[in-house]
Amino acid sequence: MQPANIVLIGFMGAGKSICGRMLARRSGRCFVETDDVIASRDGRSIPEIFREDGEERFRQLEGEVLEDLRLKRGNVIATGGGLPCREGRMESLKSLGTVVWLDGDFRELHDRASRTADRPMLMGRSLAEIEALYRQRTAFYRQAHLTIDTTGLAVDEVVSRVLRALRDSHSARA
Ligand code: S3P
């Protein structure tokens, strides 16, 4: 059986969790979020893992979750913003199903991401450094099957556009 999951990737603040949850509901699929899997397995929150063990350990845990996602069938999977950004990770994600990059205007992504204080990658970094991180990461994100520009869009509109893009890409392949 084909995995045929829908995998959401993108920078912090892109709306992967909130859109993923609504997308799952509207398409009758189960929702899984890599950060939740890591936190529940490890018994610590993501900021605690960063603080106590460092970023590299967190990236290892992401790699382990990625392996386990190979068992998923027909789910909506929301990834952490940095998960796709290592050699080979985009290829692994693409083998799980259709990978959708939720992109947007950097300032808007940054504003949304900064609303909560639980993002270790934003801590101690200037706006210019965070923008540089975003630019570096686009080299990975742009390998996605589909890209949705979320700039100025409400969550339900983003989800409608994802569903439409998935339908269009299916009919193009049929
Ligand atoms: C990270 C993004 C976070 C989380 C962790 C690291 C990153 O997820 O995985 O704090 O490196 O961009 P969100 O993209 O859901 O904020």
Image: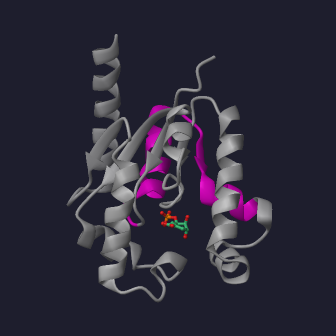
In the picture provided, is 122 more to the left or to the right than 40?
left
Name the residue at 69% across, 79% down: 48
- Taking 13 as reference, is 18 above or below it? above
Asked whether residue 119 appears in the rendered view, the answer is no
Residue 24 spot, x, y in % from top left: 50, 40
- Taking 24 as reference, is 13 above or below it? below
- Residues in magenta? 13-40
- Taking 8 as reference, is 137 above or below it? below
Name the residue at 26% across, 68% down: 106
In this rendered view, identify the residue nearer to me: 124 or 152: 124
Q: By what rule are the colours in the image chosen?
A: one colour
Residue 19 part of the magenta segment:
yes
Magenta segment's dominant SS is helix
How many numbered marks does the figure carry? Answer: 0
Residue 94 part of the magenta segment:
no
Residue 154 spot, x, y in % from top left: 27, 56
Asked whether residue 151 appears in the rendered view, the answer is yes
Q: Quadrant of residue 83?
A: bottom right
Which quadrant of the rendered structure holds the C terminus? top left
Please identify the residue farthest to the top as the structure is shown. 174
Residue 58 spot, x, y in % from top left: 66, 66
In this rendered view, identify the residue nearer to me: 137 or 76: 137
Name the residue at 33% across, 72% down: 132
Name the residue at 69% across, 42% down: 67
Residue 143 spot, x, y in % from top left: 37, 42
Which quadrant of the rendered structure holds the N terminus? top right
- Taking 22 as reference, is 145 above or below it? above
In this rendered view, identify the residue nearer to me: 17 or 95: 95
Q: Quadrant of residue 38?
A: bottom right
